[in-house]
Amino acid sequence: MKLLEYEAKHVLAESHIPVPKGSTVTDPAKLELPAVLKSQVPTGGRGKAGGILIVESQDEIQPTIDKLLSLNIKGFTPKTILAEEKLSIKKELYLSILVDRQSANIKLIAHKNGGVEVEENTNFKSFNATDNPEVLGQQLADHYELPDQTFALQDLAENLKTCFVKNDATLIEINPLILTADNQLVAGDCKMTLDDAAAFRHDWHFEEKPAEANFVTIDPSGNTATIANGAGLAMATVDAAYEAGLKPANFLDIGGGANEETLSRAFNRIVEYKNLQVIIVNIFAGITRADEVARAIVSAKKQIKELPPLFIRLAGTNYEAASEILTKENIVIMPNLESCLTTAKEVIHE
Amino acid sequence: MNNLFAGKNVIVQGITGAHGSFQTKAMLAASTNIIAGTTPGKAGQEVEGVPVYDSIKDIQATNQVDITVIFVPAPYAKGAILEAITAQIPLIVCITEGIPVHDMLAINEKLKISHSTLLGPNSPGALLPGVNKLGIIPAAMSLKGNAAIVSRSGTLTYETMAGLTDKGIGQKYVIGIGGDVIHGMGYKECLELFENDPDVDQIVLIGEIGGQDEIDAAVYIKEHVTKPIFAYIAGHHAPAGVQLGHAGAILGSDQESAGNKTSILAESGAKTANSVTELITLVSRDHR
């Protein structure tokens, strides 16, 4: 789960990491001026899109808020506006902490130049977050060329690591990390991702964000919808459809343990593609049970009248029961993905 | 390593749960020697005729345990894996999906100083047709033989295995290493196992977009693998920056794309395919 900036900064502050003074806007009349108003959208490139505005006088407040609330940034409009003090900036740095797949360890990543252009930079330096905080403080101070901030950076590294572990985070990115004119290190902006798998041991109350479903549109004008279980098989199904000369509209992984509800939701989204002509279903049941998938297909076919022809490949756990259910409804199971795609190709018309 | 997967005495942790009991039946049907299972507080029960104990220690009082297969739900999986490590079980196969990454980081630290090898988590396990079914890979679609498959995607493993079986190409090993960010055995360990097992005559590697694992595998192949090897990377048409399904599959840099991984594997000596269908065709052709 990705947090919005104000949520992430609240989590940082709880772990004693300095953030600018501020709060979400509830009563515009009570804003302390000047203030920086920031649109709270779950995407990057917000500054360039005009989602951060400075307010100097009372009569600017309401129009600025209205402007931000109606500004669409990469498909998102904010529900919340964050108001913060205006900082005097001496230097902008970059600091993040993440789980490094290759070393199976927690790493701190630093860069001398923070701010919006960070993606274009390459001179990132990584440190083992599990090292002694004193060592880390020294290393960061050397890298940033800020020797008089050694102790502050030591505290920051230690608090950031505690915050990361305690909150089951998988990424915390402070960018920019601001050195103010009076030599304080403050988190200017923050992106934070928490591990959904750990939700059971936390009492998380964050703003609802659009679900990052395992459904991705590849080409909205595509003629072929794909449904598969498992990310690998779903990607392989899309690859194979391309190779067979079809135009896949989407990637969909219904996951392990798929049931009638998940499949019905999937079919309902798929039928919205306007050029859709065929649906490829490629399920290899392991932990999923093929008979449950078969029942879901039968019920979806009954519920959705305009459903394009289905080309189904179903195998694995409880295949016999599944085959019985589908045969009873005159629904054909193809022996493999290849035959699904070849037969589907035959019904496609330009 | 060979002996690890061929281990005789197998137990199931979380045997009384829905997945645990269902899959125990399937593993028994594939003639896996399951001697016992555990679920805390359910000692004395039986699942498919297999006795249930409270803990691994209780089983070890009278039996040697070679392999454990874990179906314990994610919130309790850390405890289950640590119990198996403490019990010094040589091979731990963890099927459980959705274990928090910080739990896996903690487990990984213990593993480094342990006597155990971990396969998984979020893995379909390993299938040695006719020898052992350790997890959920459907045995009905397999055939005993001399090919070896390693993959980080569960269902794509089944797909490839079934395709080879259809063409009459049997398998000695079918191994899913799991798609999680932090996991046990990787491609390298599996390739080492396949290269050193004289029964294995050809190797199939299936990868995905995202991460460096397949690139590291390519380096290993170039330096150590002498057997014919065939590879497919899923996600040639994946959009950049979007997470596809599980934790592993997110295309970050160009380096992590299916196209780049495929060409690096090709340079290392693997024969590469752009789809599973093509992969299966490649293997059969070379086998003749």
Image (tube, coloured by chain):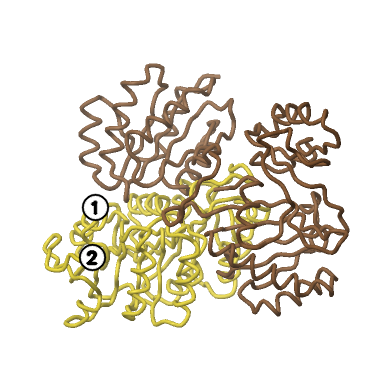
Pick the front one: A42 or A60 = A60
Q: Nearer the viewer, residue A139 or B65?
A: A139
Tell which chain the image draws in brown. Answer: A
Q: Is residue A127 left or right of residue B140?
A: right
Q: Is residue B113 left or right of residue A159?
A: left
Judge from the rendering whether residue A340 lies leftward or rightward of residue B186; answer left or right: left
Q: Residue at x 37, y 54 (%)?
A: B161
Return the residue nearer the eye: A18 or A337.
Answer: A18
Residue B212 drawn above or below residue A324: below
x and y, in percent, of residue A184 in the image: 80, 63
Query: Residue B66: image x %, image y %?
Result: 28, 77
Chain identifier of the residue bearing label 1 in the image: B
Please tell me whether mark 1 or mark 2 is closer to you in this view.
2
Q: Which residue is mark 1?
A: B18
Name the amino acid, label 1.
Answer: Ala
Residue drawn at x 50%, y 59% is: B230
Q: Which residue is mark 2?
A: B39
Q: Earlier in the sequence, mark 1 or mark 2?
A: 1
Q: Position of residue A72 (x, y in %)?
A: 70, 30
Task: Identify the image quadrant of residue A93.
Answer: bottom right
Q: Name chain B's colour.
A: yellow
Looking at the rendered structure, the kind of residue marked 2 is Thr
* Numbered circle sitting on residue B66: none
Q: Chain of mark 2?
A: B
Badge 2 marks a residue whose secondary structure is loop
In this rendering, the answer to whether A282 lies above or below B27 is above
**Residue B33 x %, y %:** 19, 69
> Is B79 placed left or right of A239 in the picture?
left
